[in-house]
Image: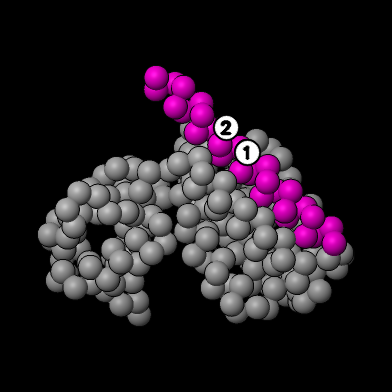
Amino acid sequence: MPSRTDQVFEAIVDDICTGKLAPGTPLRQEQLAERFNVSRQPIQQALLLLRNQGLVREFGRRGLEVAPLEPDFVSHLYELRSLLDGQAARLAATRRSDEWLEQASEVVATGNQAFADRAFAQMIRGDVEFHRAVVDASGNPLLVESAGVMWRNVQRVMGEVLFQGGAPAWVWEDHTAILEAIRDRDADAAEALSRRHAEHGEQLILDAMTDAKTGSD
């Protein structure tokens, strides 16, 4: 059973990733403790984890707020994603099992259906689930741990696209292509496709952020 700190952490992450807690929203320990019906200790620990992962930042005197999304942050995040996803796909192509392949195929099919239905929350979950499955198939526990932190932030910035009208079809077509390369044990193709997918994803996010800023001016 997750600890109280983990429960609070997960709840706040969900609120940030779905936009319920917008960038710049102050996070008050007293209010959070009352909301989750816990003492301030698990709140403090959860906020420390959130700060370490870049989801919240310090402001004012000893205060914390939801960190804003900046283009430089997105670029740095996706540089890391390109490296981790590419290496994960390369390893997955050599280490994947038939059982994993069957499960991953179901994940891709579910994600494609969510795209067809324009089910935004399910689209985010489906995208994250697919890429996490590829990382899991790498068989490298340190890569899995590093990617877990990264995907917290990726899940958040994806909302900039999906909650503003959705992502283009190529996002979901790429998943199928990556899966096929892993199925065929083509490590070079799997890595190249994953890295290209991340690079295109970065531009998609940055374009959405620019459009949102222009629309608000």
Q: Is 87 placed above or below 217 here? A: below
Question: Marks 2 and 1, how far apart in space?
Answer: 6 Å
Tell me: residue 7, above or below residue 179: below
Q: Nearer the viewer, residue 82 or 193?
A: 82
Say which residue appears at 71% left-offset and 40% top-offset.
Answer: 170
- Nearer to the camera, 183 or 109: 183
Amino acid residing under circle 2: Asp
Measuring 51% from the left and 44% from the top, which residue is drawn there?
A: 72
Q: Nearer the viewer, residue 187 or 112?
A: 187
* Magenta span contains residue 212: yes
Residue 91 is marked as: none
Magenta stretch? Answer: 188-217
202 displayed left or right of 69:
right
User: Residue 74, position in %: x, y?
Assistant: 53, 46
Q: Is residue 65 magenta?
A: no
- The quadrant in which the N terminus is found is bottom left
The secondary structure that most of the magenta stretch takes on is helix
Relative image position of residue 166 (x, y in whole percent): 56, 35
Callout 1 secondary element: helix
Give me the residue at 63% from left, 60% from top. 131
Whether residue 109 can be seen here: no
The image quadrant of residue 12 is bottom left
Whether pointer 2 and pointer 1 mark residues with C-beta atoms closer than 8 Å, the reply is yes
Residue type indicated by callout 1: Gln
Q: Which residue is mark 1?
A: 203
The part of the image, by quadrant, that contains residue 14 is: bottom left
In the picture of the structure, the residue carrying the numbered disc 2 is 207
Instruction: Identify the residue shown where x is 41% and y is 50%.
Output: 17
Is 122 placed left or right of 200 in the picture?
A: left
The quarter holding residue 86 reads bottom right
Q: Where residue 114 sits in the image (x, y, percent)?
A: 58, 45
